[in-house]
Image (cartoon, grey):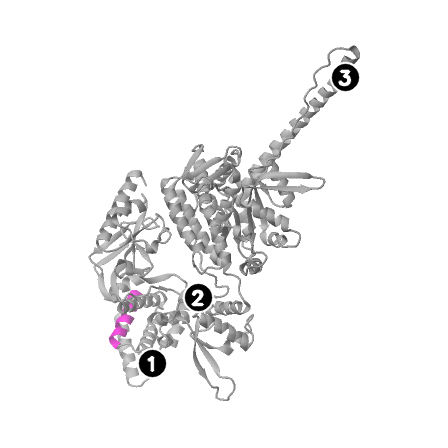
């Protein structure tokens, strides 16, 4: 986008934002290429007109805050063509609608009282059908640009209609249920049977005949059924049969045609059958259980400096791994190349706080998910730099040996001359200087060294080192052993990058390093992580802050999809990364680059730090271990800002002057990456569980897979023989945990006809199945 187009876009966005405020609708800036804001605490943002130019950048889009923030404003987001078609039949009329090219009429706007809860309706494969968006959410509005590049446009610009909240919720559920059935509606030969069965299911649920007729006709019409009007006759005939006490097909017959999962989901959407015993809205949102780990923020390439996006995207695509892996490795590798070659001053006036931009990072993933190949691919440029330095060192050693030999010869000649002068009684010649320091091996990366050897290498490489440990669990457990306290203390001190360390050994003397500085990178498996964290989370001997120093820690969801990719690596992406790594690794540690925030970036850091301190110091309810981890973020955000600024400056060919200002863009990236990393940290520190919760997690996984339908008995659980659930008592303990977490509810206890223990029946929270999507 040209400068002129960017300015025109910004003018239109600001105009829409001002108009929205006058209409009582609060707005929020949304970065280009995204559907959601990146600002911390955006749900509480209430911008005034005089603040718009400060918050909206040149390429930002605009979103409306929904719910109570904007007078009970609601957005019905229609995510598929079927839903858009059915909206015209089932949704209340409104004079405010927008869409985009290829998806006209996809957003219908209302003001609802009472305000309904947000709800998302999805197909059995997880794709979204329709969504009622309200409190705590926002929606992009025209003239914003959709992430796919199409322009959003208003199709009706009147006021949103005022509707009853429950009426709106029911209307959206009918649109979603109709869209779901349309997508799975059978072909020729089964449509008549499907219409009869659908009519029977709805009539038995208490729907009125005219409402059933409208719904069945709408589904058939949306599905392209040429006999949609005749399907209405199916409703009439089915109603007559049931009214006369006759038999008619219903949900089981419909399930046999379109699938049990589809029918079950339609019943959930429309709140039919058992869902009327305990209404969906009466249930709490199910809490995470066991291995049902807290959700993490998805990775986006715009969290990284533009110079490193091609490398991360190339490696991730070729290896079919989550981009989180390559991104974490790239950021830590960048820190390893900079270390003490640069400093960052976070505060504007207090120059006593300087941050050394080194980092510790870890990738958490199960075995077999390409952690090591990703690590090797991203760090391969560092190995090239090391190889070049090693070749240089060998040449220097050759020259040194030659010069040393010549010096030795000169010394021998001088000795002869000295003896002759003494014999003759003449002036003795001056002694030649043969003192020569051997060349030092420059180092950047090490993979397997004792801490004493690391200390020795650092004495010759004061800029710092990157330590790569392919499997971190062995290294961590090794530090826990008795007698390794000194090594643990060394690494604790090396994290800050600015503290001295002395090692005294008999035979080796004393070696003092004014500032030990290490970046650390590795992989760890979830099971090993749980084992290690058990002591740390509970405040054991390992709770000394060592693990909390791993600020760059990612644990993305295991990818379900895979595609065959066979192409050469992107040489341009790899070459750019190597150029950046090399230039930064050759900066002088004696005269490090000094960075500080620019004006806008400084304000952003101050506001971000205030929020962080509130989490760390306030009554946040977080575990002490997680609080300790987040407290290390005080230096993380400045470190990331500095690294991103340096990387893009080198990539753009800009010179690194004595004082370098970090731009607002790089500061925003750093804040966004910190937020992303915080979500992963919350997952990491929540993974330590009791046996009861682990068993509950096992049962929760089976429930989410759909092993049980809407109800099941306790005996149905323990007869499966699942791990930790193979006895009645274990099953009841796990079910008790799930009931406390609102996954299930005990709905019936009835005596068996032949006596014995009562049969315990449990109902599954309908929101569990919704969450599965």
Name the element at disc 3.
Answer: helix
Q: Nearer the viewer, mark 3 or mark 2?
A: 3
Q: What is the x, y in percent for residue 758? A: 49, 84
Q: Is residue 704 above or below residue 62?
A: below
What's the distance in space between the residues labelled 3 and 2, CA to CA?
Answer: 90 Å
Q: Nearer the viewer, residue 502 or 564?
A: 502
Q: Residue at x 27, y 63 (%)?
A: 87
Q: Is residue 2 above or below residue 563?
A: above
- How crowded pointer 2 is (Cα within 10 Å; few <14, some 14-19, many 20+) is rated as some
**Residue 542 seen from this side:** yes
Mark 3 or mark 2: name the one nearer the start of the chain: 2
**Residue 652 seen from this side:** no
Is 125 within the magenta?
Answer: no
Mark 1 or mark 2: name the one nearer the start of the chain: 1
Q: Which residue is mark 1?
A: 248
Q: Main secondary structure of the magenta part?
A: helix
Quarter the C terminus occupies: bottom left
Tags 1 and 3 touching, CB below 8 Å: no
Name the element at disc 1.
Answer: loop
Is 210 within the magenta?
Answer: yes
Disc on res. 287: 2
Q: Which residue is mark 3?
A: 416
| Span colored in magenta | 209-224
Left or right, residue 214 beside residue 312: left
Q: Nearer the viewer, residue 289 or 411?
A: 411
- How crowded pointer 3 is (Cα within 10 Å; few <14, some 14-19, many 20+) is rated as few
Q: What is the x, y in percent for residue 536? A: 55, 58
Q: What is the x, y in percent for residue 384? A: 56, 38
Name the element at disc 2.
Answer: loop
What's the distance in space between the residues labelled 1 and 3, CA to CA?
Answer: 122 Å
């Amino acid at each position: 986008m040209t400068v002129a187009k960017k300015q025109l876009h910004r003018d239109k966005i600001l105009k829409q934002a001002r108009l929205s405020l006058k209409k009582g609708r609060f707005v929020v800036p949304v970065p280009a290429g995204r559907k959601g804001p990146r600002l911390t605490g955006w749900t509480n943002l209430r911008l005034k007109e005089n603040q718009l130019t400060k918050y909206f950048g040149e390429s930002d889009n605009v979103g409306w805050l929904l719910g109570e923030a904007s007078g009970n404003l609601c957005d019905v987001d229609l995510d598929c063509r079927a839903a858009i078609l059915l909206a015209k039949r089932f949704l209340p009329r409104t004079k405010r609608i927008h869409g985009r090219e290829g998806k006209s009429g996809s957003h219908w706007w209302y003001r609802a009282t009472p305000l309904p809860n947000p709800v998302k309706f999805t197909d059995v494969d997880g794709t979204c059908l329709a969504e009622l968006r309200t409190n705590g959410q926002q929606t992009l509005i025209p003239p914003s640009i959709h992430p796919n590049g199409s322009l959003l446009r208003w199709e009706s610009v009147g006021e949103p209609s005022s509707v009853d909240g429950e009426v709106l919720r029911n209307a959206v559920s009918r649109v979603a249920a109709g869209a779901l059935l349309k997508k799975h509606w059978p072909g020729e030969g089964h449509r008549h049977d499907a219409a009869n069965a659908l009519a029977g299911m709805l009539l038995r649920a208490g729907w009125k005949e005219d409402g059933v007729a409208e719904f069945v006709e709408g589904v058939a019409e949306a599905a392209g059924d040429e006999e949609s009007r005749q399907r209405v006759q199916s409703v009439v005939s089915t109603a007559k049969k049931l009214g006369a006490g006759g038999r008619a097909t219903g949900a089981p017959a419909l399930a046999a045609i379109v699938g049990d999962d589809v029918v079950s989901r339609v019943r959930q959407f429309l709140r039919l059958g058992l869902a009327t015993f305990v209404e969906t809205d009466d249930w709490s949102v199910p809490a995470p259980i066991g291995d049902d780990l807290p959700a993490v923020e998805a990775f986006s390439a715009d969290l990284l400096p533009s110079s490193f996006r091609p490398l991360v995207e190339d490696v991730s695509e070729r290896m079919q791994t989550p981009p989180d892996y390559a991104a974490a490795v790239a950021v830590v590798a960048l820190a390893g190349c900079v270390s003490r070659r640069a400093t960052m001053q976070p505060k504007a006036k207090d120059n006593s706080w300087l941050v050394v931009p080194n980092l510790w990072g870890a990738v958490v993933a199960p075995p077999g998910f390409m952690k090591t190949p990703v690590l090797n691919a991203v760090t391969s440029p560092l190995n090239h730099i090391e190889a070049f330095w090693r070749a240089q060192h060998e040449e220097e050693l050759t020259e040194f040996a030659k010069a040393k030999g010549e010096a030795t010869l000169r010394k021998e000649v001088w000795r002869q001359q000295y003896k002759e002068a003494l014999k003759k009684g003449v002036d003795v010649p001056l002694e030649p200087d043969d003192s020569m320091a051997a060349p030092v091996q420059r180092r950047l990366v090490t993979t397997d060294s004792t801490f004493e050897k690391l200390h020795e290498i650092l004495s010759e490489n004061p800029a710092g080192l990157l330590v790569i440990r392919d499997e971190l669990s062995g290294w961590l457990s090794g530090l826990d052993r008795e007698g390794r306290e000194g090594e643990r203390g060394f690494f604790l001190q090396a994290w800050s990058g600015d503290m001295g360390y002395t090692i005294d050994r008999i035979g080796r003397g004393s070696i003092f390093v004014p500032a030990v500085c290490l970046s650390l990178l590795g992989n760890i498996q979830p099971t090993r992580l749980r084992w290690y964290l058990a002591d740390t989370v509970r405040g054991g001997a390992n709770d000394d802050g060592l693990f909390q120093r791993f600020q760059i820690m990612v644990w993305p969801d295991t990818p379900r999809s895979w595609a065959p990719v066979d192409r050469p690596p992107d040489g341009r992406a790899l070459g750019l990364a190597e150029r950046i790594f090399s230039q930064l690794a050759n900066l002088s540690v004696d005269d490090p680059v000094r960075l500080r925030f620019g004006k806008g970036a400084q304000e952003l850091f101050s506001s971000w730090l205030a929020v962080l301190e509130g989490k760390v110091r306030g009554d946040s309810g977080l575990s002490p271990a997680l609080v300790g981890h987040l407290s290390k973020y005080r230096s993380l955000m400045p470190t990331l800002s500095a690294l991103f600024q340096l990387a893009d400056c080198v990539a753009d060919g800009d010179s690194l002057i004595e004082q370098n200002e970090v731009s607002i863009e790089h500061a925003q990236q750093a804040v966004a990456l910190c937020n992303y990393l915080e979500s992963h940290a919350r997952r990491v520190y929540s993974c330590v569980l009791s046996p009861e919760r682990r068993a509950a997690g096992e049962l929760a996984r089976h429930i989410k897979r759909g092993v049980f339908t809407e109800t099941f008995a306790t005996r149905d659980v323990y007869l499966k023989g699942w791990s930790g659930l193979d006895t009645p008592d274990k099953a009841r303990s796990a079910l008790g945990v799930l009931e406390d977490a609102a996954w299930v509810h005990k709905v019936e206890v009835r005596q068996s006809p032949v006596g014995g223990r009562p049969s315990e029946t449990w109902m599954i929270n309908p929101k569990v199945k919704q969450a599965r999507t």
